[in-house]
Structures are given as structure tokens and as C-alpha cells.
Image: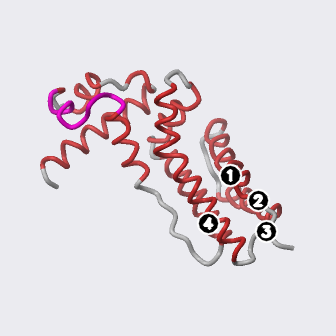
Amino acid sequence: MARGEEVDRRIHEAALELLRSRGPAAVTVEAVAAESGVARTTIYRRHRDRDEVLESALKEIAATNLLTPTEDVWADMRQAIELLIATFQQNQGVGVFLGLITGGDPELVELIRAKLLRPRIELGIMRMRAGVATGQIRPDADVETAADLVLGAVAARFAHAGTFPQEWIDSVVDLVRSALEVR
């Protein structure tokens, strides 16, 4: 790994660790410098401010755990749920989740929505629309709401239980399938 990539990795890891462990307000350039061991001047050469540090780190999260579509929309839904779970369980999701629900910083909330959530939800919606085109999902199905329900189910399960047994994943897919499948 090149030196610049290593520095960026340390900055991103520190920003995400602060976000995860102490919430959005704890992510400052000074705190990232202390956590990462990277000088503030180096961070400022790469990023204009705290928001740019977070945006860069969130882009890195967004590039991981991506859905690989198959011919089976229901298998893809299961995979999407497992990828959402992985994001939460890799601890990065904890801070993102806290950032959204505390809502103390409207710009941070919008950054998380724009860089992390909307692109993933849009991919899920596109995949369900493809399921409509292949006859697996009813043409009149509200796939946007279905995507919200799946994301909400994972977030709620994370919030109250923190565990995701395979039976739970299966039951979410079965429930959504019974609502959307062509009969």
C-alpha cells in the first residue's frame, strides 16, 4: 500500500471509530488526528474540514458490502439483508445509525443519507423493479416502500436485539415475498 493510501486509511478508520464509539459530535479534525496519529496539517491537506473527512470515510463504507444480483430476486433480497447486517455488525454501522437517530447535526444526517443510505436503497429498488420486469414481483407492488420496510426491519432488529438469526432473515424475506410476489 502506498504511503498516501495508508494515511487515508488511518484517517478514515479513526473518523469511523470516533463516529462508532462516541457519536457524530466527537468527530473533529483534532480528534481524528489524535486517534489516527496523522498530523492535523496532513489531514487538512487532504480534507477541507470535518465534513469532508466524514464524507470520504462514508464513501469508503459505501464501496463495501455491495449486492451482486442473481436471477432470483428473493435470493438477492436475502443477500441485501445480510449485507446490511454486515455493515451494522462491522461497527461502522453503529456510528452511522447513531448519527441518524440523534439527528443533532442536520448536515451530518444529510451526508449519511446521501453517501450511504440513498445509493443502497436505490440499488435495492432497481433490483426489485428488475424483479417486476422478470415476473417475480407484481407490477403494482410498491417497491420503494418494500425497500424502506427491509431497511427498517434490519435497523429495528439491530436496535433491540443486536443479533440476526438465519430464521429471522428468512422470515423477513418470506414476509416481503408474500406481499410482493406474483400470485
Q: Is residue 181 magenta?
A: no
| Pointer 4 or 2: first along the chain | 4
- What count of labels does the image hold? 4
Disc 4 marks which residue?
A: 127
Q: Between marks 4 and 1, how big is the CA–CA gap?
A: 13 Å
Q: Between marks 1 and 3, how big is the CA–CA gap?
A: 19 Å
Disc 2 marks which residue?
A: 176
Amino acid type at image mark 1? Val
Q: Relative to 72, is 108 on the left or the right?
A: left
Give yes or no for contact between labels 2 and 1 (Cβ–Cβ under 8 Å): yes
Q: Residue furthest left?
A: 3
Disc 1 marks which residue?
A: 150
Disc 3 marks which residue?
A: 139
Q: Quadrant of residue 142?
A: bottom right
Give yes or no for contact between labels 4 and 1 (Cβ–Cβ under 8 Å): no
Task: Find the magenta span and give its range.
Answer: 41-51
Of tags 1 and 3, which is closer to the observer?
Answer: 3
Q: Which image quarter is the N terminus in?
A: bottom left
Residue 101 position within the rendered picture, expressed as x and y whole percent measured from the top left: 59, 29
Q: Secondary structure under badge 4? A: helix
Of tags 2 and 3, which is closer to the observer?
Answer: 3
Of tags 4 and 2, which is closer to the observer?
Answer: 4
At 25% across and 45% down in the image, what residue appears? 9
Tag 2: Cα neighbours inside 10 Å, few (<14), some, or many (≥20)?
A: some
| Pointer 4 or 1: first along the chain | 4
Majority SS type along the magenta span: helix
Amino acid type at image mark 3? Pro
Of tags 4 and 1, which is closer to the observer?
Answer: 4
Residue 52 position within the rendered picture, expressed as x and y whole percent measured from the top left: 33, 35
